[in-house]
Image (cartoon, rainbow, N blue to C red):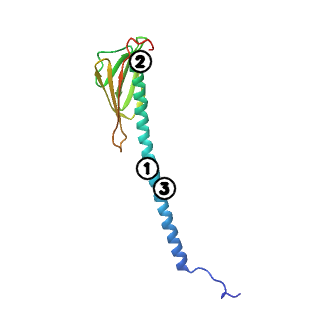
Amino acid sequence: MCLKNQRGFTLIEVLASLTILVLLTAAALQVYQHGLLSWKEEEKVLNVQDNLRISMDRMAREIRQARSLDSSSSTSRVIIYDTGNQKIVYSIEDNTLYRKAGSSVKQPVAGSISCLSFEYGPGNLVTITAAGKTKELEEITYTTAVCIRTGSEDI
């Protein structure tokens, strides 16, 4: 058996190529990990935005269709009466928006809501401001103004 014609890689070449392979793999893992963390952060932001949007849409719709606004409503809760004269209360507790209709048990509407306020203006105008945030992110705030359609035939 003649070894003169057989050529291979030296130990130094193998070690150099393994080192390059390890560095490329480490760089690829870093890029993957950064992408995964960014995706998780965006998912948290979207969750807060969805909760705010859903809660604002539901409150605005019910306030718009309400028969009347209760005078005991405050800046932290709104009390309305629907067309069937059922009392509906929206309030916030422990970062969760609750809705209580009539004598029923209050039901959660949305979570991750850190602040909820109502401002009452002339002509049955209600301005709703809701804010939400995750632990790591800055606060996201949504505001909408709704006018109660009292005496409307399409309620």
Could you say which disc has been placed on residue 65 in the image? 2
- Tell me if mark 1 has few (under 14), some (14-19) or many (20+) residues whose alpha carbon lies within 10 angstroms of its own: few
* Residue visible at 69% across and 88% down in the picture: 2
Q: Are marks 2 and 1 in contact (CB under 8 Å)?
A: no
As drawn, 154 above or below 143: above
Q: Nearer the viewer, residue 63 or 33?
A: 63
Residue at x 28%, y 19% (from the top left corner): 122
Kindly identify which residue carries mark 3.
32
Dot 2 amino acid type: Gln
Closest to the observer, 106 or 155: 155
Q: Tell which circle, 3 or 2, labels the residue nearer the N-terminal end.
A: 3
Q: Quadrant of residue 149?
A: top left
Q: Earlier in the sequence, mark 1 or mark 3?
A: 3
User: Which residue position is annotated with label 1?
Assistant: 38
Residue at 47% of width from left, 62% of height from top? 27
Q: Nearer the viewer, mark 2 or mark 1?
A: 2
Residue density around tag 2, few if under 14, some if 14–19, many if 20 or more, within 10 Å:
many
Q: Specify the amino acid type for callout 3.
A: Tyr
In the displayed structure image, the side of residue 87 where residue 36 appears, left or right: right
